[in-house]
Amino acid sequence: MNIKINKFLTSNIFPFFYMHLSFFIYCMYPVLGKIAAKYNCFSVQFVLIYCLIIFVLFIYALIWQQALKRIPLTVAIANKSITIVWGMILGALIFKERLSLKMFIGAFLIVLGIVILITEKDKES
């Protein structure tokens, strides 16, 4: 079991997993912001949720920096567009927002672009 975990941690996949975990965490701040918007500005609930937002962004920054140690900046920034897809998914799941066909097509194109970028980088290596 430990051998499998060590192999994963040293593989080329782990930095991308780490990076996408940071993007998912990053996508939580607008969700929390939308929840905070339901409360009066500077109410106790509003302030507590915004403190949580600051904490979430702090965790995101730590994970993002670790990912940048192992992934070229050009690849990392291009992958950040996946946050649009995460935002769509979270909006639909948490706030019951409707997703249109255009949104699905856009999400598909984003994922396709990331796949093309990653496979292109693999060919260059």
Image (tube, rainbow, N blue to C red):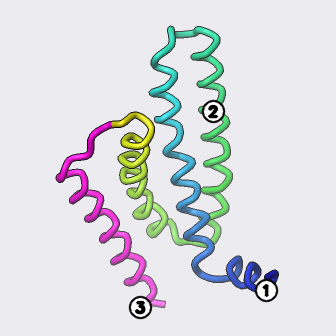
Q: Which residue is mark 1?
A: 3
Q: Nearer the viewer, residue 97 or 42?
A: 97
Mark 3 is on which residue type? Lys
CA gap, disc 1 and disc 3: 28 Å
Residue type highlighted by circle 1: Ile
Q: Residue furthest right?
A: 2
Q: Is residue 26 left or right of residue 90?
A: right
The residue that disc 3 covers is 123
Element marked by disc 1:
helix
Label 2: few (<14), some or many (≥20) within 10 Å?
few
- Label 3 sits on a secondary structure element that is helix
Quadrant the N terminus occupies: bottom right
User: From which residue to which does the magenta span run?
Assistant: 97-125
Q: Residues within 10 Å of mark 1 (few under 14, many from 20)?
A: few
89 left or right of 56 in image = left
The residue singled out by tag 2 in the image is 54
- For the residues labelled 2 and 3, the Cα–Cα distance comes to 39 Å
Q: Is residue 92 left or right of residue 98?
A: right
Distance from Cα at disc 1 to Cα at disc 2: 36 Å
Q: Earlier in the sequence, mark 2 or mark 3?
A: 2
Q: Where on the picture, by quarter, is residue 21?
A: bottom right
Residue 70 in the image: above or below residue 87: below
Cβ–Cβ under 8 Å for marks 1 and 3: no
Q: Sequence-wise, which precedes: disc 1 or disc 2?
A: 1
Q: Which mark is residue 56?
A: none
Which residue sits at x=68%, y=80%? Answer: 8
Q: In front: 122, or 74?
A: 122
Q: Is residue 120 magenta?
A: yes
| Disc with the residue nearer the chain's start (1 vs 3) | 1
Residue positioned 36% across, 36% down in the render: 96
SS majority, magenta? helix
Q: Secondary structure at mark 2?
A: helix
